[in-house]
Amino acid sequence: MHRYFLTINTLEGCSAFDDAEHVDLALSHLLRTSADYSFEVTAYCFLPDHMHALVEATNDQADFLKFVAMFKQRSGYAFKQRTTELLWQDSFYDHILRDEESTLAVAAYIVANPVRAGLCSDVRSYPFVGSARYSIEELIDAVAWRP
């Protein structure tokens, strides 16, 4: 099963994810679409102008490109209905994790993004990180863990 580190930027760097309602909207579509397309969200982080996610296929038929396309379509449509604006840039960045790359190390990188960006000093105070697999405490432990 493949693991993917996904980054998607907002259109023209707009700060859509400064708004908790916009994050909740996109997150609900991320979780729904991951379930629909046989992926588990190991870690996610929404920063003002982009999002990161670590997702893992849950079966051999899972299609990452279809999953990302549907997530962007669903969340982008809902965002446009709410704001009349476009949400996502056309492309995205992905990295397929190799067998030797640690899931926890990548999760730690994702979860620590708001601290590195100066948005908070403690991950616990940043509301837009999480996981469908791990508790916030487990993610914080991952941040403290160094390979």
Image (cartoon, rainbow, N blue to C red):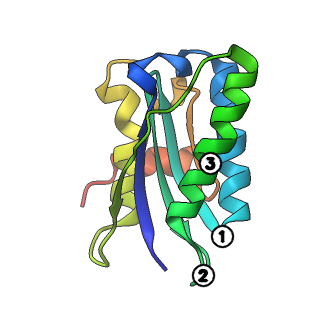
> Can the viewer see residue 139?
yes
Residue 52 percent coordinates (x, y): 44, 43
Distance Cα–Cα, label 2 vs label 1:
8 Å
Task: Tell me, yes or no, whether the two marked residues, 2 and 3, touch with CB atoms within 8 Å.
Answer: no
Residue at which label 2 appears: 61
Distance Cα–Cα, label 2 vs label 3:
17 Å
Where disc 1 sits, the SS reads loop
Where disc 2 sits, the SS reads loop
Residue 98 percent coordinates (x, y): 29, 74
Name the residue at 74% across, 52% down: 32
Q: How many numbered circles are shown? A: 3
**Residue 101 position by quadrant:** bottom left
* Left or right: residue 101 compared with residue 70: left
Residue 68 percent coordinates (x, y): 54, 54
Where disc 3 sits, the SS reads helix
- Which quarter shows the C terminus? bottom left
User: Can you tell which mark lies on residue 71?
Assistant: 3
